[in-house]
Image (spheres, rainbow, N blue to C red):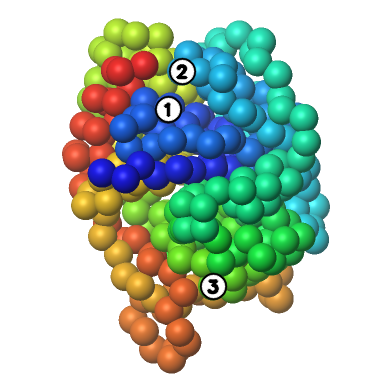
Amino acid sequence: MERHRIIIDTDPGQDDAVAILLALASPEEIEVLGITAVAGNVPLALTALNARKVCELAGRPDVKVFAGCDRPLGRELVTAEHVHGKTGLDGPVLPDPEMPLQDGHAVDFIIDTLRREPAGSVTLCPLGPLTNIAMAFEKAPDIMERVREIVLMGGAYFQVGNITPAAEFNIFVDPQAAKIVFASGVEITVMPLDVTHKALVTKARNDAFRAIGNRVGVAVAEMTDFFERFDKEKYGSEGAPLHDPCVTAYLIRPDLFAGRHINVEIETMSELTMGMTVADWWRVSGRAPNATFMGDVDADGFFTLLTERLARL
Ligand code: RIB
Ligand code: CA
């Protein structure tokens, strides 16, 4: 099977960390060309640090990590320490990385990679606000037609918002960037809260992570122990949603997910609904479809895959 050659754009974030670990544990299906950090869950300095901590946890200090945009395109940065802790990766104690940040800006790495690699061979996997992606498209419009696909975590429809009543965090932080990306014409697959809220890390599932017995399994269980407290209290659910790993799991097992090819627009005018993903699930708008918007996941299959792969690290 042809490997997915990907750039992970990320704001780690415990769930981002698990998504990165899953990708690095799956070299038969995924080649990680590089990781680009963006401001989101926590400020850029921390997301760039955390991305390297995760690579070294995976035993992959060779992965190229770049720092990107430290604020959204047109708004003040909103962070989520209340969910992820002040470090953004609270839970396990992970050593400061020895691997350096790469020279150069993440946006330039995205542009250079897409211009260098064969057209249609690189997939972009944004796991945080879309600032880096939008900046790359604005700076180098020629790269848009060279992207194979964008598979992103963000947005919500039936699940409505998690940071405001109307908006999911990644889109809310940089709605102008999201508008640019969803209008780009690039093929987009969206993992919204509608899916990720069906991928709950129950106690049994987290116990299975811990029982793997390697340092990755223990670290992931400790990450979950930390970040699940917020969602379980807020939603009264039996576990926290594991948002970002839905992106890398989709690349490995797309059959675990189901959705519809529909029109998705981004609210950028009203402060009340700023960052809302207006997903035309029932196809009533007449607007042209621009994204495959996922609505369901085989949660048991997802966690079985994830646990099996984390055991490989
Ligand atoms: O709303 C969930 C998303 O926001 C996830 O990507 C999480 O890491 C945060 O960035
Ligand atoms: Ca994220």
Residue shown at 26% from the left, 44% from the top? 1
Q: Position of residue 306 (x, y in %)?
A: 29, 31
Q: Amino acid at mark 1?
A: Leu
Q: Tag 1 or tag 2, which sits nearer the N-term? A: 1
Q: Tag 3 or tag 1, which sits nearer the N-term? A: 1
Residue topped by disc 1: 24
- Cα distance, mark 2 to mark 3? 34 Å
The mark found on residue 185 in the picture is 3
Residue topped by disc 2: 58
Q: Secondary structure at mark 2?
A: loop
Location of the C terminus (image quadrant): top left
Q: Tag 3 or tag 2, which sits nearer the N-term? A: 2
Determine whether, in the image, residue 289 is placed left or right of residue 99.
Answer: left
Residue shown at 68% from the left, 29% from the top? 48
Determine whether, in the image, residue 119 is placed left or right of residue 158.
Answer: right
Q: Amino acid at mark 2?
A: Ala
Q: Position of residue 99 (x, y in %)?
A: 65, 15
